[in-house]
């Protein structure tokens, strides 16, 4: 049983143990009939306050605690890299409440820790739903449409999802002090509800949340004009979240194997790190981002290997 489930069970057990003797209460009210109206009013206010307190406590329990408790509860792989918000940044739309607990920018890649909750009581969210995020800076969209979402936990009783998301922006975007993380939809891939076997939009709208970041320019490296078999890499960047490549190619994309035809390893002083990728490809161009399962220590990287081509890291 998870920590969430145990704590929720303790709360449930505590309130379940409250025993109200309704017969004694009725007799007491009858004996005090002359003050019935005043007592009834006090009793109603007390009951209302009691349940408001329970509701507020449950909400606070589900949504507060900050990034430190978020990391303690779920132990996400990249948690130590994020900058915590003093208070979670929330946005509501279409009966869905989203909240960001922390974020950080590394070049064109942005790490985000967020929650997503259905507050209508309809329980529309499931383990098959994910947010579709975009990055905005200075009022302009900086995203290229790629993201990697890792579900950390799903609380069924509150219909709340907890995510670690890596959103990929355009190559070479500047380091910004403030970013807007904009959710433009909530996607669902539930096999039982798929339409034509495709991922569909569960809810569409805009959820805008502002986050602050810190300077990470020393954690980003970039190269240009790299030749590998069948492709010319115009731009390549390395940061703690992974490696981005974009350029032109002569691959046969009808085989739909192009991203699999690219293998990337990052070598450091201790071991080689194999990355896994995804992204977009056109008839003659591509834009890939290769993710890592744990943060890359940039200070220890010696070489990046792309399809056997070794690119030395110079400091």
Image (tube, rainbow, N blue to C red):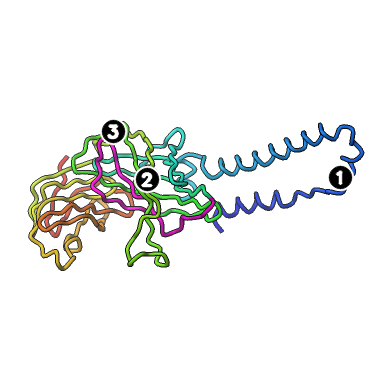
**At numbered mark 1, what does the secondary structure look like: helix, strand or loop?**
helix
Q: Which residue is mark 1?
A: 26
Viewer can see residue 298: no
Lateral position of residue 123 relative to residue 206, left or right: right
Of mark 3 and mark 1, the one earlier in the sequence is: 1
- For marks 3 and 2, give the one nearer the viewer: 2
Give the extent of the magenta segment: 121-149
**What residue lies at 45% left-to-right and 48% top-to-bottom?**
116
- The answer to whether residue 62 is magenta is no
Magenta span contains residue 123: yes
- Viewed as shown, does residue 303 lie left or right of 86? left
Q: Pointers 2 and 1 in contact (CB under 8 A)?
A: no
> Measured from the top left, where is residue 188 in percent x and y?
38, 58
- What's the distance in space between the residues labelled 3 and 2, CA to CA? 31 Å
Secondary element under disc 2, as helix, strand or loop, is strand
Mark 3 lies on a secondary structure that is loop
Report how far apart the C-alphas of labels 3 and 1 lie in the structure. 66 Å
Q: Quadrant of the N terminus?
A: bottom right
The C terminus sits in image quarter: top left
Q: How far, Cα to Cα, is label 2 from label 1?
A: 51 Å
Question: Residue visible at 24% across and 51% down?
Answer: 268
Rendered position, 293 above or below 29: below
- Which residue has dot 3 on it? 215
**Where residue 259 sits: x, y (%)?**
19, 60
In front: label 3 or label 1: 1
Q: Using the image, tell me which numbered label, if any, was put on residue 205.
A: 2
């Amino acid at each position: 049983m998870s920590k969430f489930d145990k704590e929720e069970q303790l709360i449930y057990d505590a309130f379940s143990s409250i025993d109200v003797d309704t017969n004694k209460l009725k007799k007491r009210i009858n004996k005090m009939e002359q003050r019935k109206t005043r007592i009834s009013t006090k009793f109603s206010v007390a009951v209302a306050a009691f349940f408001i307190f329970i509701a507020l406590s449950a909400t606070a329990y589900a949504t507060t605690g900050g990034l430190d408790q978020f990391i303690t509860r779920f132990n996400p792989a990249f948690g130590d890299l994020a900058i915590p918000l003093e208070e979670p940044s929330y946005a509501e739309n279409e009966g869905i409440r989203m909240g960001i607990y922390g974020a950080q920018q590394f070049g064109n890649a942005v790490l985000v820790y967020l929650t997503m909750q259905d507050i209508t009581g309809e329980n529309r969210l499931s383990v098959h739903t994910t947010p579709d995020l975009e990055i905005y800076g200075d009022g302009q969209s900086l995203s290229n449409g790629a993201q990697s979402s890792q579900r950390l936990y799903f609380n069924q009783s509150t219909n709340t999802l907890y995510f670690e998301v890596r959103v990929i922006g355009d190559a070479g975007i500047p380091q910004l002090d403030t970013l807007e993380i904009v959710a433009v939809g909530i996607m669902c891939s539930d096999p039982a509800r798929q339409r034509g076997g495709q991922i569909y939009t569960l809810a569409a709208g805009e959820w805008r949340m502002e986050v602050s970041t810190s300077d990470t320019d020393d954690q980003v490296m970039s190269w240009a004009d790299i030749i590998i078999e069948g492709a010319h890499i115009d731009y390549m960047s390395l940061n703690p979240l992974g490696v981005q490549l974009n350029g032109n190619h002569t691959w046969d994309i009808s085989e739909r194997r192009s991203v699999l035809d690219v293998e990337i390893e990052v070598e450091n002083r201790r071991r080689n790190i194999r990355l896994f990728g995804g992204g977009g490809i056109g008839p003659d161009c591509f834009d890939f981002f290769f993710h890592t399962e744990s943060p890359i220590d940039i200070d220890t990287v010696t070489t990046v290997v792309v399809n056997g081509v070794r690119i030395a890291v110079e400091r």
